[in-house]
Amino acid sequence: MGSHDVGDGARRWFDVADAVPLLLDARGVVTSWTRDAERLFGYVAAEAVGKDLAGLLTVGDAARVPDVLELCRRSGGWAGLLSARRKDQHPVPVMARFTSADEPGGPGRWLVLVNEMGEAHGWSMSRSVLEQMVAGSPIGIAIVDTDLRFVWSNETLAQFGGGAPESRLGLRLADVQPGFDAEAVEARMRQVLETGEPVVGYEHVGRLRAAPFRETAHMLSFTRLDDDRHRPMGVYYTVVDITDRHRARQRLALLDRAGRHIGRSLDTARTAQELAEVVVPGFADAVAVDLLESVLRGAEPVVERAEAPDGSVALRRAGLRSAGGGVGDGGTAVVSHPAGSPAVGCLTTGLAWRAERLGPDAADVNPYLPPVGAGAGPPSALIVPVRARGATLGVTTFLRRSTQEPFDEDDLTLAEDLVSRAAVCLDNARRYTRERDAALVLQRSLLPHRLPEQEAVEVAACYRPADTLTGLGGDWYDLIPLSGARVALVVGEVQGHGIDAAAAMGRLRTAVRTLAALELPPDEVLAHLDDLVSRAQEDGEAPEEDDGGPARAVGAGCLYVVYDPVDGRCAMAAAGHPAPAVVLPDGTISFVDLPQGPPLGAGGPPFESAELVLPEGSTLALHTDGLLSQSEQWTPEAGRERLVRALTARADSLDLRCRTVIDALVPDRPRDDVALLMARTRRLSPDRVAQWELPADPAAVAEARKAAARRLADWDLAELAFTTELVVSELVTNAIRYATGPIRLRLIRERALVCEVHDGGATTPHVRHPRTTDEGGRGLLLVSQVTRRWGTRFVPDGKIIWAEQSLTDSEV
């Protein structure tokens, strides 16, 4: 066979014109050598002919020669990559094809076509090989011409809808996939045709004709095909189904959105509504969150059976969202779930329930199914129990319209994950509701609901805690009626915030009210209060510090003020507390020069009182530190200047003025608790006070009774004459008999009729319980029986015994 015949055979098989031919005998020895072989290997014919093929290859491939020849004998040929070794020992990668070159009756021979692979990418493959590759590819592949009409596609593309490859020929994408967003895809094809730049990884989400109820996602890549003259022939594109990856991304995005939007508040109904809003419309077309009524109240979850004979369970619809327009109503709607319904089953078992399509008994699933929008067929449904910390709080119903793909197991898993996350937030909100309600009860018990009515001062108070969640703090204010028409004004603060500080404040407030009943001067009240705090600290009764800061009475501040409307005298003392501001009737504003005592329980010098006389219509502004220290650049002087400016503002009432000051100086979320108590002083008119100096003579008792009776007649209180004469007689008699010094009798007509007897004695009288045979000792016992209350208070020059009679049924 001549070299020409050999070359023609090689081209028919190998289809490569520049291949180097070699002729081997059956043992693999070179029997023919050409100039092309000399250029490729570097050996001349004399050196190569008779050489074993293994000698022309590198060591690794030389060992493969016996196996290659054996394969050739069995199958008639072989093709593959080998590493040739040039004469200069330089390795050269080559593609080799072995073909039988036997002649009839002659010895066995092999024709080897060798092609250097230095610039080649691999095999030069025939169309049949290429068709095998693309036809069997798991990736959808198609070619469209410059008019974007199909000229070829593989069988895999048919799995994405649109028919078999032969039915696509000559059609556009919109023709084979109605409803598919063909314009967006064809826009990418035109872009590739115009620029020649491939588009890789274009993602398209939509619905295919093959799966109209299922949203699918595909990743497409486009490459332009050019002819030999580099003119565009069409576009070659591939399609890969990435629906699972797309849905996984959607699930992750939904969980992320749920984490960011559910539980932003500590309101149970709001949290349930947030769950409903997060999943519609991305996951479901309608969602209803039904919770146990006890959960909305903040109580422990309790399944309450309705009174109906069927034993249905009543839940509150706390959250609702629908593609049809439904929204929640904050848990006001009651939904009664029949016994044996899936919702009740979820409540009792704690297991979820799923229906691909609801049947005719859809009302049994949820008697108040929210609208899911358009769609004639029955919806798909999920019911997932709302469980947190081992307790079931309610159920969540998910609906998906009939035009959507039904819920599957993956959707159920996602719904359970969403609900479980929301359940923790709902349970936190429930617990917060319970704790906040308890805190509010505590607050109502610690702070006065309303300040008591009296005629000494007109009062207004404002309180703004730093802990806006519970509404509790360590600051407090109080007004305590005292004997003789006087009042005590109190403002104090405990370090820390929240419920611990409020509890410590409550103990101090109770102690102050108890000490006030002893009728002590302000400095003595604070001294006794300081002793109580110190002893409690020594005995270990004060709570430990926690993460929220100390909540102890030690270091607390208190301002105690006593005002007498008879003469306008005002006495006060402070324990680690700012002095009050005074606004005189002419508008002049100043701060009381008040000696500062140490904070309670801190130890230090004794407390001192300051006393001043206030004109009628003066306003005292008692406040805690927080009123002046809200600014970042706070100093005592700057704080006082801001307070003066706020107090200068005019207002129609004292209540409005108090709120104006708070709003001007304190933000909605203050850094520290703030309490402000404003008191506008009043004076009792002289005609409502009567006073007599009495000699230490028993005969003065009768004159005192007569004088008191005449004044009661002037006051139109003759009905109290008998009891008043009795009280005057007993108190004056005791003063004459047991005390020394001057004796004064005073009657005060305020909201009560007050009878006071002053003497120079220093002993406290006590009620005795005499035997029937005793001739005396019944005076104070009689006084206690005929009056509302009585007591003793000490003054610098003696003591005052007083008794009050109610004027509830009399005109003041």
Image: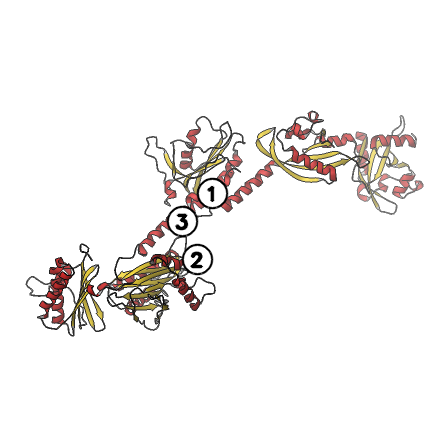
Residue at (10% x, 65% y) in the render: 706
Nearer to us: label 2 or label 3: 2
Q: CA distance from mark 2 to mark 1?
A: 29 Å
Nearer to us: label 3 or label 1: 1
Please, is residue 206 above or below residue 611 in the view? Answer: above
**Label 2 vs 3, first from the N-terminus:** 3
Q: Which residue is mark 1?
A: 274
Q: Is residue 43 left or right of residue 549?
A: right
Under tag 2, what secondary structure? loop
Residue at the bottom extreme? Answer: 741
Q: Which residue is mark 3?
A: 432
| Residue 156 vs residue 516, the one in the foreground | 516
The quadrant of the picture occupied by the C terminus is: bottom left
The quadrant of the picture occupied by the N terminus is: top right
Q: Which residue is mark 2?
A: 667
Q: CA distance from mark 2 to mark 3?
A: 24 Å
Going by the numbered disc 3, the residue's amino acid type is Tyr
